Amino acid sequence: DGGITQSPKYLFRKEGQNVTLSCEQNLNHDAMYWYRQDPGQGLRLIYYSQIVNDFQKGDIAEGYSVSREKKESFPLTVTSAQKNPTAFYLCASSIGGLAGVNTGELFFGEGSRLTVL
Amino acid sequence: SQQGEEDPQALSIQEGENATMNCSYKTSINNLQWYRQNSGRGLVHLILIRSNEREKHSGRLRVTLDTSKKSSSLLITASRAADTASYFCATGPSGGNTGKLIFGQGTTLQVKP
């Protein structure tokens, strides 16, 4: 079945540690996104990538890093510079890449919940 | 930055009743989408309405868009307990090719059996 797989589902981090969240898609989508969701809040965009080997900062990129070496994969690293990393992280993909003016629907993974101990 | 604002923030109804959620936004859009999120899960796309459309239906869902008022509404008819979830509107900006959606803060719907 086609879809987006995020792992791990739950992750605990000690202060000062970097952690990496995995996101893999087999939908052959060009664009991929990382969002952060805090309790009772909407989604805030961290980073997005519209094509392999290229990515752009979203609204809250500080303390995060990403890579897009393969079309299928868009891992997110939460670095020690992120002062309040406890949140629910959602990865998404869409068909539209650089050629897409019309933003199509997003397909989401099931999320990764990160807790700082 | 958050563009969409949903109203109400929370809604509680009985099974069989209709549920209406509203979304307002600030800038010009290419399209507006509605998503559903069950507790602790990812978001699921429900419906997309383009800026040149005024109304769209999908099963028990009806979405309207008023670009002059910069607002949209989502109507769920004959609600079921399984409709209990959070609902988010998301706007696709007009112009450019950023491909970014901007999400509102959501309406939490509880449908009581």
Image (cartoon, coloured by chain):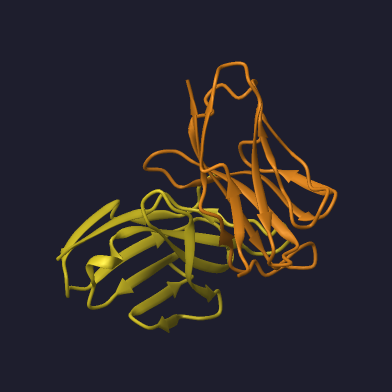
Colour representing chain A: orange
Q: Quadrant of residue A59?
A: top right
Q: Is residue B72 left or right of residue A45?
A: left
Q: Is A115 in front, or is B56?
A: A115
Q: Residue A18 at x, y = what percent? A: 66, 25
Residue at 59 percent across and 49 percent down: it is: A6
> In the image, B63: left or right of A48?
left
Question: Residue, x 37% and y 78% (percent of image)?
Answer: B62
In the picture, measured across the screen, residue B110 lies left or right of residue B22, that is left
Q: Residue furthest top?
A: A16
Pick the residue in front: A94 or B39. B39
Q: Observer-nearest residue: B20 or A8?
A: A8
> Image quadrant for the N terminus of chain B?
top right
Where, quadrant-wise, is the C terminus of chain B in this rendering? bottom left
Q: Colour of chain B?
A: yellow
State whether residue B44 is above or below residue B41: below
**Coordinates of residue A40 in the picture (x, y in percent):** 36, 42
Nearer to the camera, B76 or B25? B76
Q: Position of residue B105 (x, y in %)?
A: 41, 49
Q: Position of residue A51 (x, y in %)?
A: 81, 57
Q: At x 48% / y 64%, what residue is drawn?
A: B44
How many badges with numbers are in the image? 0
